[in-house]
Amino acid sequence: TQLLEQSPQFLSIQEGENLTVYCNSSSVFSSLQWYRQEPGEGPVLLVTVVTGGEVKKLKRLTFQFGDARKDSSLHITAAQPGDTGLYLCAGARGAQKLVFGQGTRLTINP
Amino acid sequence: EADIYQTPRYLVIGTGKKITLECSQTMGHDKMYWYQQDPGMELHLIHYSYGVNSTEKGDLSSESTVSRIRTEHFPLTLESARPSHTSQYLCASSEYGVGTGELFFGEGSRLTVL
């Protein structure tokens, strides 16, 4: 049983469209991180959300942590080919344990 | 830009061979980790270290072993590789605990055992 479920697992859209990726769990996390991984590279941290209901923006990317700290979403506005990659959410259970979702593979077509 | 390096990037070997995947970081981080990543699956923690001479097994059982003799170096060894060990191995380090700090990842070592 996967602790963190990401959906969709695959998403292919045209440049300029908007999209939302979800990260859901039945467990509470002390914080949640989003990473992006490009082919042949390691994951790179995009954002950390800590407070229930928190919203963080990174240019065209908007991250939200659920009020109950069990879920999160990533919304991309006007997607660009440079947004292509594997998006991973990771929930922290205390200070030392991090649980990853299986990832959403996003392709933005020019 | 992260200063954490993994070698080799790609390795194809036969069954029964001994292999060591190298991981080095120049950030002075005490905490280092090894994750296993397979397509469509979540990253699984297989080993971690909170400092020199400290190593622990992670959530996913692994036949590999690790050592931490120097702060900057955290190699992973497989004594006798098998096809089931075929995977991508990611090394990471952090300054703080994973709940509050950023994980810095290397580029990964993709291992194929024939």
Image (cartoon, coloured by chain):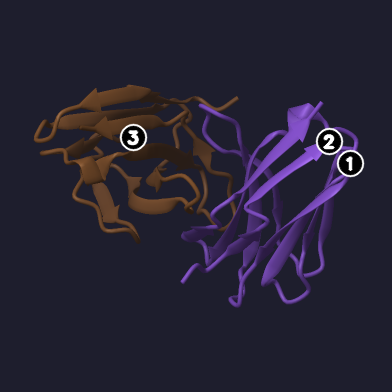
Chain colours: A purple, B brown
Viewer-closest of A72 and B40: B40
Q: CA distance from mark 1 to mark 3?
A: 45 Å
Left or right of residue B58, residue B53 in this image: left
Residue type at tag 3:
Thr
Residue B80: image x %, image y %?
Answer: 11, 39
Q: Are marks 2 and 1 on the same chain?
A: yes
Q: Which dot marks residue A14? A: 2
Q: How many neighbours does mark 2 have within 10 angstroms: few (below 14), some (14-19), or many (20 or more)? A: some
- Residue B47 at what x, y percent from top left? 31, 50
Give the chain letter at badge 2.
Answer: A
Disc 3: CA contacts within 10 A as few (<14), some (14-19) or many (>=20)? many
Quarter of the picture containing the C terminus of chain A is top right
Looking at the picture, do discs 3 and 2 lie on one chain? no
Q: Secondary structure at mark 2?
A: strand
The mark lying in front, picked from 3 and 2, is 2
Visible in this render: residue B69? yes
Tell me if residue B41 comes above or below residue A39 in the rendering. below
In this rendered view, identify the residue nearer to me: B47 or B97: B47
Q: Are marks 2 and 1 in contact (CB under 8 Å)?
A: yes
Q: Nearer the viewer, mark 1 or mark 3?
A: 1
A50 and B9: which is toward the camera: B9
Q: Mark 2 belongs to which amino acid?
A: Gln
Describe residue B37's horizontal placement relative to residue A62 as left or right.
left
Which one is in front, A39 or B22? Answer: A39
Q: Chain of mark 3?
A: B
User: How far apart, in angstroms, are the residues tagged by discs 3 and 2?
Assistant: 45 Å
Q: Which mark is residue B71?
A: 3
Name the secondary structure under disc 3.
Answer: loop
Q: Mark 1 — residue?
A: A17
Q: Is residue B6 above or below residue A67?
A: above
